[in-house]
Amino acid sequence: MPQPAQDLPWPTPAPAARQRSSEGRPASRRTLALGLAMGLLVLPSVLAAEIPQEAQSPTPQEAQSHEDARSEALADATGSDDPDFFFGRPFWSVNLRAGAFLPRASGQFYDFAFERFTLDRGDFRSFTGGADLGLWVNDHLELVVSADVASSTQRSEYRDWWEETPQGDSLGIGQSTRLTYGPALSVGAKVYPMARGEHLSRFVWVPNQVAPYLSAGLGVMGYELEQWGDWVVETGPDEGLIFTEEFQTSDANFITFLGAGLDYMLRPRIALNLDARYTWGEDKMGGDFSDFDRPLDLSGLRLTAGLSYRF
């Protein structure tokens, strides 16, 4: 027969209520830990939902996708991959030109050459090429730095002298003349009476199809005059000696110019440029031509056409 609990020599088991309480405390810890873990898992999603979309930095793929979408929208709006407007007015332009230089060819040297040799004013006309770098100040004004060069070479003979051979034949006494204009470096300005484009909004600028302008500037032009071939020294009435020689002089001189032209839009960034400018310049002749006491005339009309790129 079991003895009463109070008669046992060792401690009696804890009451049932105490045993339930000791089991309840571990259960509460497990519940709390499980709740914290679930909260940590849910927290990033909650924070992401609370952050505005604009504050999240797009991934490279998203940025590229947005850029492609904007390009497609521009193409759809304009009907082409190259929209006919700019996001703001261009600031720079590069222009490549080619054409003809028509010198005035007036003065002591030219009079001497035209009288003695089979040359005329048209023989000094030449091909010319040039380039411009422009800074757009506003829709009506552009500052331009230009470089140009032109050169002509012409074969001629004496008008009143010829060489008699032992066989009695008459041969022309020939020589060549080369006149190089440039390089010419100048700074100037283009003034557009009508604006070159129109601002449709703060960011959108649309170029006009045709933009005429007036221009003016100044600069420095180098030149070189060369003659080589056979020459005559008179020794008596209707007699002379023939010798072969080369003559040369070169220098640089101050120039000014006035001009006019127009830009005709071919594409939003590319324009056809037609330009006409008259240049004034002269320089005292030296070197092998120092016997000429009048300046060498370097003035003339330059007519060019080219392509201009805007950016």
Image (cartoon, rainbow, N blue to C red):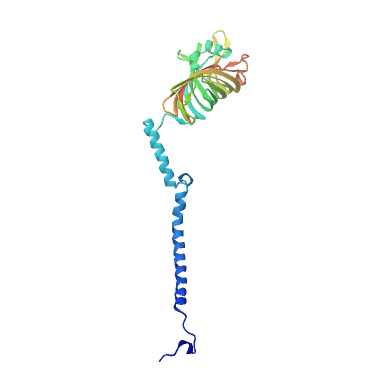
Residue drawn at 46 percent across, 68 percent down: 28
Q: x and y percent of residue 88 in the render?
A: 49, 31
208, 2: nearer the viewer: 2
Residue drawn at 37 percent across, 33 percent down: 76
* Quarter of the image where one finds residue 188: top right
Q: x and y percent of residue 101 in the render?
A: 50, 19
Q: x and y percent of residue 168 in the render?
A: 46, 12
Left or right of 32 in this view: 143: right
Quarter placement of the N terminus: bottom left
309, 73: nearer the viewer: 73
57, 189: nearer the viewer: 57
Q: x and y percent of residue 237 in the render?
A: 56, 7
Most extreme residue toward the top is 237
* Quarter of the image where one finds residue 182: top right
Most extreme residue toward the bottom is 1
Residue 63 visible to the viewer: yes
Q: Is residue 292 above or below residue 66?
A: above
22, 186: nearer the viewer: 22
Residue 162 visible to the viewer: no
Q: How many marks?
A: 0
